[in-house]
Image (cartoon, rainbow, N blue to C red):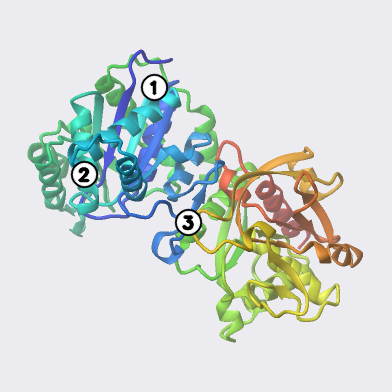
């Protein structure tokens, strides 16, 4: 089903962040996608960074990378995982991109001598951008998530643009709010009321309100929100605590959200098709088996730093009808003697060393890889995880004592990991790594080839360092398997242990994993962990 006129849905926050606007926006998009509509999600972030490339995971969570190399907000991972589509850099709008574009246009004389202002020049640019994405991606519905909270000064101009936009296009506003409870059964609606008044003071009237809360939304709370926010009760939805985020579309569907959305947008209801989605969610909620996998890193205090890895394990687990419990292992604890590798990994069925930067925690990661190799635990290395796996092998198998990455030790006698040649003259930090989707040629007969079932693959990257080709022969002679390279053979992309299930890739396959299309390496890794459990 395709629409004659494009529709727009704008998802707004409330007085606090962290409510899950991205998950809600993705769930709304999934409901409409299951009705046969083509969806394009956009997210606006008010920060003045051009992209997320230089942001610290402790402050911002994971940096998500798209096929075209755009480093963007982690919500784009949610969109892709729910919709099973590949997004583009144009779907990400930041304050930095907007202001840079306006200033560059002004310098070129693009405003014909006018004094350049927030209104109308910046707001016009925003409206044009949103329209352009819908047109270029041939969308039936464009869903715009506004990052941050209502009242943030950095969001004000974007909300003003959306207010103007609503008088020019078919726009539906959705407000996500939190309804706290101070005692059991006593839900407090005042924060929602105040947030709604603030939104309305900006000239925007929410058409739908979605309520996050820790207990069921009572009839009394629903009535109060309806009365004070001028929204009919049938357009107030419950967003309760869930076992898995992938259940939210089904929860909203039970409350007839699709029916309301389609009616408000003036779209005929042709019936939904969520059969496969429901089956996969059922596998997540009712697994036949269970395993524990250690994710070893230095950002484990902020779980959002590894959200794509965690979700890829959910997808790989669902494919294998298994629940994957994640054990977060802070590798700095190993380095500093607060815990031993054996006690931290003894109850695990597999080990993942994810991406990262810098020296802190690296010796702990290497110790985890060595333990997994020697104890026969399945191991999956991702980006930095490959680099540390090569260092571990070089030191302990190839006989290259004190081998290291030049990122960690510039004076190492055996720099088995070194800067990519094109990175050596770069001084700026933003947007200059090897980014985006790159092709890889796999070696037949390897575990990686078996996982993908084909010789040529494409995965996303985000790195500056690589396996030093000066040491490839020495590594291979000692038994390390070079399972994948760039098409021209100049960059090592995948390595494997000759014995046991140990695979490490320079890519980030977790970034392309979706519930309906799980990452092949994660599917194979979970299966290997299950096989080890059977043998035990």
Label 1, label 2: how many angstroms apart (C-alpha)?
A: 26 Å
Category of crowding for the residue at label 1, using alpha-carbon neighbours closer than 10 angstroms: few (below 14), some (14–19), many (at least 20): many
**In the image shown, does 30 or 170 lie closer to the viewer?**
170
Q: Residue at x 45, y 20 (%)?
A: 36
Category of crowding for the residue at label 3, using alpha-carbon neighbours closer than 10 angstroms: few (below 14), some (14–19), many (at least 20): many
- In the rendered view, does 375 fall on the left or right side of 342? right
Is residue 281 visible to the viewer in this orientation of the structure?
A: yes
Mark nearest the camera among 3 and 1 is 3
Residue identifier under label 1: 140
Residue identifier under label 2: 157
- In the rendered view, does 383 fall on the left or right side of 69? right
Q: Which of the 4 image quarters holds residue 261?
A: top left
Mark nearest the camera among 1 and 2 is 2
Residue 293 vs 36, above or below: the answer is below
**In the image shown, does 253 or 153 lie closer to the viewer?**
153
Q: Residue at x 33, y 14 (%)?
A: 268
Q: Earlier in the sequence, mark 2 or mark 3?
A: 3
Residue 455 vs 37, above or below: the answer is below
Residue 420 vs 36, above or below: the answer is below
Q: Residue at x 37, y 46 (%)?
A: 97
The image quadrant where one finds the N terminus is top left
Percent of width and height locating residue 8:
30, 28
Q: Which of the 4 image quarters holds residue 120?
A: top left
Residue identifier under label 3: 53
| Badge 1 element | loop
Percent of width and height locating residue 354:
60, 61
Percent of width and height locating residue 170:
25, 23
The image quadrant where one finds the C terminus is bottom right
Is residue 349 visible to the viewer in this orientation of the structure?
A: no
Say whether marks 3 and 1 touch (CB < 8 Å): no
**In the image shown, does 391 or 405 lie closer to the viewer?**
405
């Amino acid at each position: 089903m395709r629409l004659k006129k494009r529709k727009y849905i704008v998802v707004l926050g409330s007085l606090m962040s962290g409510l899950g606007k991205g998950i809600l926006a993705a769930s709304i998009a999934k409901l409409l996608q299951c009705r046969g509509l083509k969806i394009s999600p956009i997210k606006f972030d008010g920060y003045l960074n051009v992209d997320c490339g230089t942001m610290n995971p402790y402050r911002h969570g994971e940096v998500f990378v798209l096929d075209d190399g755009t480093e963007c907000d982690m919500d784009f991972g949610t969109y892709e995982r729910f919709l099973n589509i590949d997004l583009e850099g144009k779907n990400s709008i930041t304050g930095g991109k907007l202001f840079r574009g306006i200033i560059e246009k002004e310098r070129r004389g693009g405003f014909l001598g006018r004094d350049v202002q927030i209104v109308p020049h910046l707001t016009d640019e925003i409206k044009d951008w949103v329209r352009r994405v819908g047109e270029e991606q041939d969308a039936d519905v464009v869903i715009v998530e506004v990052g941050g909270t209502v009242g943030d000064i950095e969001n004000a101009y974007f909300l003003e643009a959306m207010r103007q936009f609503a008088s020019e296009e078919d726009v539906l506003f959705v407000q996500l709010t939190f309804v706290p409870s101070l005692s059991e059964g006593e839900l407090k609606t005042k924060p929602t009321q105040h947030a709604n008044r603030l939104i309305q003071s900006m000239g925007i009237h929410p058409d739908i309100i979605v309520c996050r809360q820790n207990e069921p939304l009572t009839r009394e709370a629903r009535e109060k929100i309806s009365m004070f926010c001028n929204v009919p009760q049938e357009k107030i939805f419950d967003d309760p605590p869930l076992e898995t985020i992938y259940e939210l579309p089904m929860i909203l569907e039970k409350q007839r959200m699709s029916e309301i959305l389609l009616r408000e947008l003036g779209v005929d209801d042709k019936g939904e098709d969520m059969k496969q989605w429901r089956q996969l969610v059922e596998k997540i909620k009712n697994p036949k088996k269970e395993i524990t996998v250690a994710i070893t890193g230095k950002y484990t205090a902020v779980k959002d730093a590894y959200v794509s890895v965690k979700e890829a394990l959910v997808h790989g687990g669902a494919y294998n009808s298994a629940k994957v419990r994640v054990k977060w292992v802070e590798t700095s604890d190993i380095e500093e003697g607060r815990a031993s590798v054996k006690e931290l990994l003894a109850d695990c069925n597999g080990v993942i060393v994810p991406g990262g930067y810098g020296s802190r925690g690296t010796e702990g990661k290497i110790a985890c890889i060595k333990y997994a190799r020697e104890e026969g635990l399945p191991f999956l290395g991702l980006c930095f995880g490959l680099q540390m796996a090569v260092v571990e092998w070089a030191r302990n198998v190839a006989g290259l004592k004190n081998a290291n990455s030049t990122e960690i030790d510039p004076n190492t006698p055996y720099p088995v990991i070194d800067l990519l040649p094109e990175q050596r003259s770069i001084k700026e930090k933003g947007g200059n790594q090897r980014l985006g989707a790159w092709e890889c040629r796999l070696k037949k007969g390897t575990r990686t080839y078996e996982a993908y079932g084909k010789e040529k693959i494409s995965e996303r990257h985000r790195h500056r360092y690589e396996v030093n080709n000066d040491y490839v022969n020495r590594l291979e002679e000692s038994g390390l398997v070079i399972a994948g390279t760039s098409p021209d053979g100049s960059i090592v992309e995948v390595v494997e242990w000759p014995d046991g299930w140990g695979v490490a890739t320079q890519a980030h396959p977790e970034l392309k994993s979706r519930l309906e299309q799980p990452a092949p390496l994660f599917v194979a890794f979970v299966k290997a962990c299950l096989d080890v459990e059977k043998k035990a």
